[in-house]
Amino acid sequence: MDVVEICVLISSLSFFGYAISYFISPHMKQEFIRYGLQKFSLLTILLEIAGAIGLIVGLVFNPILIVSSLGLALLMLSGFIVRVKIKDSIWVSLPALFFMGLNAYIFWESIN
């Protein structure tokens, strides 16, 4: 297993975990309200699930890996911007920044 495959597994499992927690934890729904994005919460979760599935499928079909990793990187960039906008601390914003970087790395490696 190479580095990109490990990164794909880390990212996809994390996004699956986040999506599951949205459906079982009231705290996750409250976070979207805090962000002012309650109207987009289900769309965001569905995009994360689609991205996580795309990363796994992308291990076999590289074009899907390219699209999925880019999409998740942009989604996490948006998440980071929202956290900066609502004045969350850098510590609380780090996961979005980390997953943006992780998926940007997967994207970069998948196009080369």
Image (cartoon, helix red, strand yellow):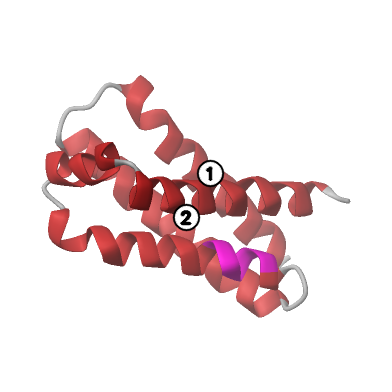
Q: Residue 47 carries which label?
A: none
Q: Is mark 1 on a helix, strand or loop?
A: helix
**What residue span does the magenta drawing correspond to?**
52-56
68 left or right, relative to 79: right
Residue positioned 79% across, 46% down in the render? 3
Residue identified by numbered label 1: 101
27 left or right, relative to 55: left
- Against 17, residue 71 (above or below) is below
Asked whether 7 or 105 is in front, the reply is 7
- Against 81, residue 112 (above or below) is below
* Image quadrant where residue 90 sits: top left
- Prevailing secondary structure class for the magenta stretch in the rendered image: helix
Q: What residue type is labelled 2?
A: Ala
Q: List x then y, in percent, for residue 94.
A: 42, 29
- Against 94, residue 105 (above or below) is below
Residue identified by numbered label 2: 73
71 left or right, relative to 59: left
Asked whether 21 or 6 is in front, the reply is 21
User: Residue most toward the front?
Assistant: 24
Marks 2 and 1 in Cβ contact (< 8 Å): yes
Asked whether 27 or 97 is in front, the reply is 27
Q: Which amino acid does label 1 sit on?
A: Gly
Q: What element carries label 2?
A: helix
